[in-house]
Structures are given as C-alpha cells and as structure tokens.
Amino acid sequence: MRRYDLASGRESAPSEPLSEEAPVALRDHPGARVFEACRACHSLRPGEHRAGPTLAGVVGRRVAGAPGYVYSEALRRLDFEWSGETLARLFEIGPAAMTPGSKMPEQRVPDPAERAALIDYIATVGR
C-alpha cells in the first residue's frame, strides 16, 4: 500500500505496526506493515468484525462467508473461495474489479512482494 503525507503530498514510509493482534514472533513479519492499512476495517481475531469482516480464517472460506457479518448483496452473489491466489488477485486488480458493488474501498497492493507478504501474514496470523 502506498501512504502519503497529507501536508506535503509526498509518499511516506509506513508507520510501525500496531501489532497487538499478532503473536510476538510475527510482529516483525514484513506483511505486518502492509496489514496496517487493513486494520482500520479488518481484524484478524475470530468473530471481531469492524467496518469489514474478520479476516481470521479467510483462506479457505467462501466469499461473504464470515458468520455474523452483514455483507453487501453484490458480495453475497459472488461464488468463489478465498485462497492465496484469489487474495493476490484482489489486491492486484482492486475490489472494484474483483468484487464490484461491495463495500470495500479501493485498495491495491501494486508491489508483488508486499502482496505476498500481506497474504502470508493474514493466512498465518488469522488461522
């Protein structure tokens, strides 16, 4: 994810992760920094929904399948399972292209290494 300083408009380095959700051993995981942009809407704790559903157990889960979260009609109509590949595609092309009509704001991770780190982090911490 790219982050920008609002005052100058220049790209800024990511902040230090607020890693209370991550096990101590994973707080330095490269995906933890990328996940910081996701934390406003998503948790990695089971059943802890925010503006978006928990990402705990997302790998292997059907789209719009987290119990207790109210999904958009557009997302409920989709029929696929979240995997490393589908998550990578989501962050490569963006939600508008992959899940049109969903509530997820447009977020892309253009760098393939950052995408891979993010997906590994979500899959590992969100088990």
Image: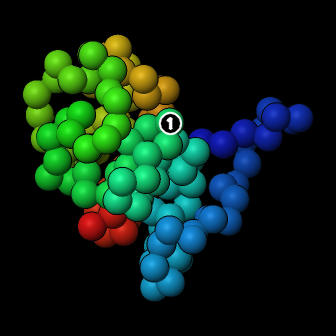
Q: Closest to the observer: 103 or 84?
A: 103
Kindly state the secondary structure of the residue where label 1 is placed: loop
Mark 1, other Cα within 10 Å: few <14 / some 14–19 / many ≥20: some
Kind of residue sitting beneath label 1: Ala
Quick one: quadrant of the C terminus?
A: bottom left
Residue found at the far front of this picture: 68
Residue farthest bottom in this picture: 25
* Viewer-proximal residue among 108 and 111: 108
| Quarter-of-image position of residue 87 | top left
Q: Image height check: is 125 above or below 52? A: below
Disc 1: which residue:
51
Percent x, y for residue 72?
Answer: 33, 20
Residue 28 rendering spot, x and y as whole percentages: 53, 77
Locate residue 5 relative to residue 110 in the image: left or right: right
Q: Residue at x 11, y 28 (%)?
A: 79
Residue 60, position in %: x, y?
14, 52
Query: Residue drawn at (58%, 45%), measured in percent from left and top?
Result: 40
Quadrant in which the N terminus is drawn: top right
Q: Position of residue 123 (x, y in %)?
A: 29, 62
Residue visible at 34% across and 37% down in the picture: 69
